[in-house]
């Protein structure tokens, strides 16, 4: 069993590789280790995955598996991507899980081209390589709840997603459209995964939980936009990984129930599928900070601010289609997930 995982040094990529290695997979990881956030965190994840050949890592720390092969390369390099597939003789028994992306909204105003290059051109390269000579068994790719844009309430895969509010959300919707076109043209099985506000140990430092906890421990102030009334379906990373792992062999097929005169957005006549992967419950940022205060035993210093242009008020995930397909949906209670993250944060950042 083999899988190529792009973005393997990232938050979700690291956890997925760890799970795959534990299940006996050979994992071929690709990551450019960009400096969007602290590369030391990415390097530390790689060390734990057992790559002892990556220059610059502390190899004395060892690793968990000999079945992890790492390529420090960029998915925007089409030719190099093809070389990696060729070197590893990728074929119809192998999986591809595409997680590499320019994440979040922090760089939308300062570096918008990164979202186009990495998220759209990079995914296009993945599709080109996979639809050519290699044709893997199944290609899964990370989409995002950001595709729902200005939508509010409970959101499902059949909802209209034509009102994006950030370039990041646009790039992820573009991924879904590209995937459908390639599923149609090349009969390539493609599954999109709309992740909802993922959090947990080894999380990115630019994410809300990381920012809030770091500020609380440092006695610094926290800014809550929209006066703290924004809400999210926060989803613990273990729930994400369990869902992705179960989806590996849930390979989409043409759906004869699809009616071109009344097109259902949640299905397709081609081997294409998109799933929400998010917690059913949602919490406001104000309540989220209160929960963190309870877990840490520390008081937050909070400033309230208006909504930013690139923000969304919020929505709640409907993961019923996922549950029906794989018999599983995210269920970790937030207090449990936050507690586990706080324990990791204190240990990793050496907070007494």
Image (cartoon, rainbow, N blue to C red):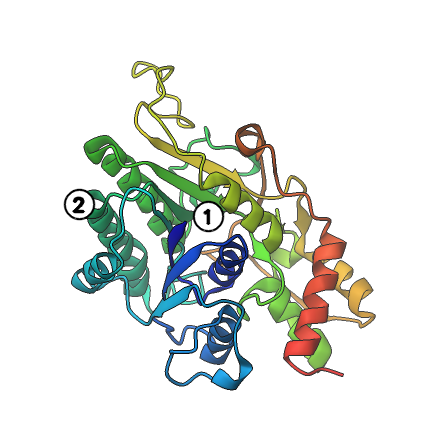
Compared across the picture, whether 250 is left or right of 289 comes to left
Disc 1 element: helix
Q: Are marks 1 and 2 in contact (CB under 8 Å)?
A: no
Judge the density around disc 2: few (<14), some (14-19), many (≥20) Cα neighbours within 10 Å: few
Q: Mark 2 points at which residue?
A: 132
Q: Where is residue 33 in the image (x, y as percent from the top left)?
A: 38, 73
C-alpha span from label 1 to label 2: 30 Å
Q: Name the residue under label 1.
A: 146
Disc 2 element: helix
Compared across the picture, whether 78 is left or right of 328 comes to left
Depth order, front residue of 50/116: 50
Image point (39%, 27%), residue name: 265
**Residue 313 seen in this snapshot:** no
Q: Where is residue 117 in the image (x, y as percent from the top left)?
A: 26, 61
Image point (31%, 45%), residue name: 174
Q: Where is residue 225 in the image (x, y as percent from the top left)?
A: 59, 60
Above or below: residue 116 compared with residue 246: below
Image point (16%, 62%), residue name: 79
Judge the density around disc 1: few (<14), some (14-19), many (≥20) Cα neighbours within 10 Å: many
Residue 209 position by quadrant: bottom right
């Amino acid at each position: 069993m083999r899988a190529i995982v792009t973005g393997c040094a990232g938050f979700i990529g690291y956890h997925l590789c760890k799970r795959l290695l534990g299940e006996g997979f050979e994992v071929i990881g690709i990551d450019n280790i960009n400096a969007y956030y602290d590369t030391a965190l990415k390097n530390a994840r790689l060390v734990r995955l057992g790559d002892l050949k990556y220059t610059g890592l502390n190899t004395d720390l060892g690793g968990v598996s000999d079945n992890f092969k790492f390529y420090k390369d960029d998915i925007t390099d089409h030719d190099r991507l093809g070389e990696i597939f060729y070197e590893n003789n990728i074929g119809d028994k192998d999986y591809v899980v595409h997680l590499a992306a320019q994440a979040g909204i922090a760089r939308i105003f300062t570096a918008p081209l990164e979202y186009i290059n990495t998220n759209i051109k990079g995914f296009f390269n993945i599709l080109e390589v996979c639809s050519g000579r290699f044709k893997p068994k199944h290609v899964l790719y990370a989409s995002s709840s950001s595709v729902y844009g200005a939508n509010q309430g409970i959101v499902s895969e059949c909802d209209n997603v034509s009102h994006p509010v950030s370039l990041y959300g646009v790039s992820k919707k573009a991924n879904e459209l590209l995937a459908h076109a390639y599923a149609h043209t090349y009969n390539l099985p493609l599954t999109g995964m709309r992740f909802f506000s993922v959090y947990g140990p080894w999380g990115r430092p630019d994410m809300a939980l990381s920012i809030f906890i770091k500020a609380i421990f440092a006695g610094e102030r926290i800014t809550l936009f929209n006066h703290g009334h924004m809400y999210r379906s926060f989803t613990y990373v273990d729930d994400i990984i369990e869902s992705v792992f179960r989806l590996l062999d849930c390979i989409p097929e043409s759906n004869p129930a699809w009616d071109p005169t009344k097109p259902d957005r949640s299905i397709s006549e081609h081997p294409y599928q998109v799933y929400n992967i998010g917690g059913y419950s949602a919490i406001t940022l104000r309540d989220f900070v209160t929960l963190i205060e309870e877990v840490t035993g520390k008081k937050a210093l909070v400033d309230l601010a208006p909504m930013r242009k690139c923000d969304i008020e919020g929505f709640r995930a409907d993961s019923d289609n996922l549950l029906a397909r794989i018999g599983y949906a995210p269920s970790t209670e937030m207090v449990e997930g936050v507690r586990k993250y706080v324990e990791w944060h204190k240990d990793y950042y050496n907070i007494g």
